[in-house]
Image: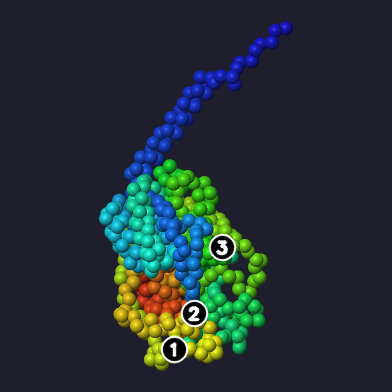
Amino acid sequence: MRVKAMPRLFSQPSRLLTTLLAITLSALAVREAIAEQEAQAAKLHAGVAAVDVSPTQFPLNMPGGFRGNLAEKNYDPFHSRAIVLSDGETTIAMVVVDNLGVEPEVIQSAKEIAAEETGIPTEKMMVSSTHTHSGPSSGGGNEREKAYQQQLREGIAESIVQAHEDLQPAALGAASHPLPDEVFNRRWYLKPGRMPLNPFGEMDIVKMNPPRSPDVLDRPAGPTDPDVSVISIEKANGRPLGLFANYSLHYVGAIPRGQMSADYFGEFARLMPVRLRAGEDFVAMMSNGTSGDINNIPFGVTRPPREPFEQVSIVARKTADAAWFAVEKIDRYQRDLTIDMREREITLRHRRPSPALLKRAKEILEMKDPEQIEKLPRLAQIYARRTVRMAELPSDTVTVKLQAIRIGDIAICAIPFETFVEIGLDLKDRSPMEQTIVVGLANGRYGYLPTPRQHRLGGYETWLGTNKVQKDASEILVRNLMEMLEEVSGVGRVKSEG
């Protein structure tokens, strides 16, 4: 009996399947073409760039401590990373530099170079520093430092120019994700009888980085901000283009001896392309938030020993994970949004020592007897020199730059100080915008910015020479930033205090 052969349905496509496939491919092509047209018509354009600014001449001093700290080589690279955004009317640049705190004069000259090349006004550029303590100075003392200062100036400008050249249709979204595990307030009330004299021979109410023993510690003197905040940028085809992140944590440290490192900020930037499965043209950056009183020491907890750079890697991985979770929360990327930016120059008074304090400082510096010097409080000679320098400042005032940025329903506040976390939390709480990011060490570095309450408690961050401006400076700056947020938001009066 002959068996009838089955039709070869799967060995070659039928005309119907071929037709359906052609229709499907055609529909996909039409959809992609429409998406491309929409992207081209969208207001938002974005560009990103990362320029290597790693030191090349050694030895170089790593500032940030009380004494010299020479480095002989780089452990990992340093970068100036830039994002340029345009809504068709306003173009802005946001730059994050791997540095302790780039000098205002270097930043301004870099902005002027970039402005000439791109046409972006200097007042529409924000340049912030990560505050790595294992990086080079930007001050330009000896010949090697002066050479690096010029390299840094050119690198910052070049990152803005390259990002501007990369401008392309884009979409943008923002979110945040908490990472409370790695932020700790470093100012503590101590148990009775445990507070040492400060360098001025006085007794503070709180101490920065006290011994971690439960016999010493009482309670922290302030809060923390646990959020890793992100602004995520996509290309027209939906692929990742750039990421601007912010976390209120000082540097981590514990870098191999004699080597320079971008700390967790640089390692975060290296990891994010992997987290987001991005291409080689993707650029991520981590800006320093309000971390003036926040560090990575888990007071009251025993942490196992770490090898050099290990804790940096741990924090970088965890912040990269938190940033990934934040990106996953973004349910809408906007192509049609408004960009605005305000800059104000605020004049603040320098702090000056009292006649009695200045007299005491000069007496300390004149001491020659080793036994007499040995009896002085810790850091007394260092702060005596700082006291004299504060007395000899040629001007009674200093002018600093504040910036407020609007990107759709996102706000960014830029402050040129090591800003206390309470200030950032206050700005976030009172901001009229849906999400607010506060960037510290932006457009310069002028010392610490405690609140008046924290000034009354004393401690390292409030000492004359560590803090350099009037004690109510934070209130002046916050008041101006709230007015600037109202201006850029266009939504009426901001939330009142309390």
Tell which tag, 1 or 3, sits nearer the viewer. Answer: 1
What label sits on residue 35 in the rendered view? none
What label sits on residue 366 in the rendered view? 1
In the image: residue 277, left or right of residue 52: right
Q: Which amino acid does label 3 sit on?
A: Pro
Q: Residue at x 64, y 15 (%)?
A: 6
Q: Which of marks 3 and 2 is nearer the N terminus?
A: 3
Q: In which quarter of the image is the N terminus?
A: top right
Q: Is mark 3 on a helix, strand or loop?
A: loop
Question: For residue 440, which quarter of the picture?
Answer: bottom left
Q: Tags 3 and 2 in contact by the CB under 8 Å rule? A: no
Question: For residue 406, which quarter of the picture?
Answer: bottom left
Q: Is residue 5 above or below residue 304?
A: above
Q: Which of marks 2 and 1 is nearer the N terminus?
A: 1
Q: What element carries label 2?
A: helix
Q: Residue at x 47, y 59 (%)?
A: 286
Residue 428 vs residue 365, the one in the foreground:
365
**Can you name the residue that lies furthest to the right here?**
1
**Is there any visible trace of residue 68 in the rendered image?**
yes
In the image: residue 123, left or right of residue 331: left
Report how far apart the C-alphas of labels 3 and 2 lie in the structure: 26 Å
Label 2, on which residue? 460
**Is there any visible trace of residue 290 in the rendered image?**
no
Residue 145 vs residue 26, the one in the foreground:
145
Label 3, on which residue? 256
How far across and how far down the image is residue 33, in percent? Answer: 39, 36
Q: Which amino acid does label 1 sit on?
A: Glu
Q: Residue at x 47, y 81 (%)?
A: 382
10 Å neighbourhood of mark 2: few (<14), some, or many (≥20)?
A: many
Residue 61 vs residue 40, the one in the foreground:
61
Q: In which quarter of the image is the C terminus?
A: bottom left
